[in-house]
Image (cartoon, helix red, strand yellow):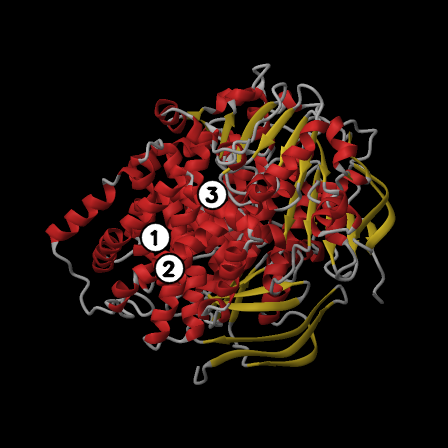
Amino acid sequence: MSSNYFNTLSLREQLAELAKCRFMHLDEFGDGVNALRGKKLVVIGCGAQGLNQGLNLRDSGLDVSYTLRAQAITEKRQSWKNATENGFTVGTYEELIPTADVVLNLTPDKQHSAVVESVMPLMKKGACLSYSHGFNIVEEGMQVRDDLTVIMVAPKCPGSEVRAEYVRGFGVPTLIAVHENNDPDGEGLALAKAYAVGTGGHKAGVLMSSFIAEVKSDLMGEQTILCGMLQTGSLLCFDKMIEEGVDAGYASKLIQYGWETTTEALKYGGVTNMMDRLSNPAKIKAFDLAEQMKDIMRPLYHKHQDDIMTGHFSRTMMEDWANDDKDLLNWRAQTAETAFEKTPAGDVEIPEQEYFDHGILMVAMCKAGVELAFETMTSAGIIADSAYYESLHETPLIANTIARKKLYEMNATISDTAEYGCYLYNHACVPLLQDFMKTVKSDVIGRGLELADDGVDNARLIEVNHAIRSHPVEAIGAELRGYMADMKRIV
Amino acid sequence: MGTDNLIRFDHLDVDFDGEFQLCDICWQIESGQQWMISGANGSGKSALAAVLAGVGDITGGVLEHLPARVAIVSYEAQAALIAAELRKDDADIMDVISEGTPVQEIIDASSTDAELASQLAEKFGISHLLDRSFRKLSTGETRKVMLIRALSSEPSLLILDEPFDGLDTQTHQMLLEHLQILSQSLPMVLVINRFDERPAFVTNIAYIDEGRLLSTVDCADKAAFDELYQLLHLKTSDLQIPAADPDFSVPVLDPAQPLVQISNATIQYGDTVIFKDLSWTIEAGEHWQLTGPNGCGKTGLLSLITGDHPQCYVNDILVFGYQRGQGESIWQIKQFIGYVSTALQWEYRVSTSLRHVVISGFYDSIGLYSKYSDKQRDIADQWLELLGLRERSDEPFNKLSHGEKRLLLIARAMVKQPPLLILDEPCLGLDDMNRQLVLALIERICCGSTTTVLYVNHHGQDRIAGIGNHLALGTSDD
């Protein structure tokens, strides 16, 4: 029964599903959480997404409880502690699933098949099964009972951000979808919308999409620019600075907090604004470096997207699951042993602007990664809106996790699927950039250009600015950020 | 003047008829400086100025280099002169109707420059009154006479206690210009109640509170000046707590119900019990102070009320008419609460203008995600005015000092006039000046609004006038 669902579709159907993407307006959410009010929501799994989504849904006035495997309860595992310390009712599948109107499957991807197979027989007729990631349906071809409604509500952020933004009175952009094979009563959309309201997502923007578009874009984004590029960039930039005699503590801090600081500019005004934070000579330098890296890395981005589309990626990852995560654990251990990871950030004050001035190469890597991921996704049939959220939009959010506790924190926060893809990318990308890295010095990473004269050639500056501003990710980004700003002005 | 130290106060204690004392005043007035003494009403501003004119009994310390010719204009001196005139009348044993001393004589008694005196009389617009009896003048007119006397007496130190009080705009302006010119050659000490009315030539400010000289600030020291400016602005400006937005009021609460009723509450992490069986009721209008050592659960208890603590769903908590865990949303609770804490300050990292930070208080959000009305903008601006930050309302929040941020977050919490204001360690991490600032603002809120204040700190100091109830959590032995 587990065959790749995407691959069972005709090309026509595949393209139609990939292209499903509509930005929903705030007035479509006027019904609030009403479609879920009074219903019993039972969450499976109490990790970062499970706990934080549950906290938001409960604070929105909904009835939330948690179900865990009997073993997790009797052994008082972390997931049990998470749920009970937060004042939630916790019970076994047998106790809670039969009472549930909506079952929220928020376990790691690799557990989905086993979890869904064990809860499905316990679910009451006509209930709803919800996912926050479509992997199980799309890549594993999970067949769900006909009477059940299957929806997806996928906040485009790590779980911690889902909570933090809600507490601030806002939310995170969210993708919703209804699995058309499983919408017997046609209530899937209403439930998904209410769920998005309950987590606060409607305030930040909701994309109506499909399970397929979500999986194929999400996997691509997380493997390449979001996690892979930041990991590769961290390791290469740190080693380069050490080689150039930059103080190790300084180098460590510049990278740990540099991604967060530089991508904050990205969040507010796209690649254009991030580049505008550099001096004119530094901007031209970063532009040139990014162009070189894009040429070097383009085949790698294409390979990742192709492997995701054909199902090669998911098949090899599932083989690793079957092999007790041998590759994943091995790569995770290697990451922990890298020089960057083992060097604590120095006790030095780095002014905000200095992260740009001394991190020209990091800015260039970020630009190259965002643009390549976006170009590759859209050329594979993914709509620009989705591609924007899965590339540029999420980059600052992942960068925040590195600022907290370096790569360890990033890899601990993201899903196992993202982590696996991240290592996969890193192992290919580090050697790929080897020769390029030999050509750069500490002027672009660690020390800054230190020019006596900031003058530039007018024609060259115009050319570079035009190239930055006319990239398609900038157009859709301005539009979607504009929606968010508009929403701030509505109500 | 040979020495730079024109006048020196060294740990000076001064008693004023046993009714008021200045304590331990250390102060130097150097040549070239123009001082302003500022402070709240009753803080001792006038007393300190009067010491320079030889008033008060020195009970300790040293006062050196007081100049011989000191001229003073103050309410006290004005009252003394009027009283003396009245006594002359009483002392008149002859059976004729006393006309009292003419104004011209009163002026001549002190003035050493008749021509200047006559010019000033012209400027102050009282030339036609010179022949009239001093006793028959209005208060404003006697004040002008006092000023003319002092200004035409060629003093070596001029003390003006509230010189602009009661003067019309035109006269105020004329006097200001006159003093501006004088300031180039004559040292002055001005007592001015409204900090915003300080003349531009003032170079140094002495801040006095409860008879003690708390700080002296050189106006050229921008940072120190800004801090003092805010404090004095709060303490001395005649400001009202801005009104609520009539179009955005929180729902009316049943006055018979308590704001908060917590019954036998417990907070527990694993086997660690933070507190248990705690019951607490807060009635509307009862201000509370909550104290307790670090780690006793003060913040936990507060967040049971605000709904930020997840265990609020497993405790028996009634807030603003909502029994928690019955399908209410957290925003329905938060609309009744204004909340300030250090943690909130850390959280508030979004780059937003000062104005938007204040407006965000209407929506209980960190950052502003809602369209606001012109009315709300006006109210926010009134709060910024109250804090002395109106000029900076478009600046980003993260450019503020630690203390200014705290003030602004208090304004944010108060902007919607919530039934309950929770201040969790509002003075934490603040220096003395900023502490004073925050406490002054809280005092204004306690006295000037219908909001019930719940004030939390880890020790019993920093008490605030107007807070009558006290809950001590844990014991100091913990």
Relative to A102, say whether A254 is above or below.
below
Three-letter code for the amino acid on which mark 3 is drawn = Arg
Residue B319 found in image quarter: top right
Q: Which residue is mark 2?
A: A233
Q: Quarter of the image containing the N terminus of chain A?
A: top right
Chain under numbered label 1? A
Q: Which residue is mark 3?
A: A315
Find numbered disc 2 in the image and state the secondary structure of the residue it sits on: helix
Chain under numbered label 3? A
Tag 3 near tag 1, CB within 8 Å: no
User: Disc 3 vs disc 1: which is toward the camera?
Assistant: 3
**Residue drawn where x is 67% and y is 29% of the image:** A120
Rounded to the nearest angstrom, the CA distance separating label 3 from label 2 is: 27 Å
Q: Nearer the viewer, residue B186 or B271?
A: B271
The numbered mark, 1 or 2, whose residue comes first in the sequence reads: 2
Number of marks in the rendered image:
3
Quick one: label 2, few (<14), some, or many (20+) residues within 10 Å? many
Q: Is residue A226 left or right of residue B88?
A: left
Q: Nearer the viewer, residue A245 or B401?
A: A245
Residue B207 found in image quarter: bottom right
Tag 1 near tag 2, CB within 8 Å: yes
The numbered mark, 3 or 1, whose residue comes first in the sequence reads: 3
Quick one: label 1, few (<14), some, or many (20+) residues within 10 Å? many
| Residue B234 picture location, percent across and down | 58, 51
Residue B132 visible to an observer of this rendering: no
Mark 3 vs mark 1: tell me if same chain. yes
Three-letter code for the amino acid on which mark 1 is drawn = Cys
Relative to A455, say whether A50 is above or below.
above
Q: Which residue is mark 1?
A: A366
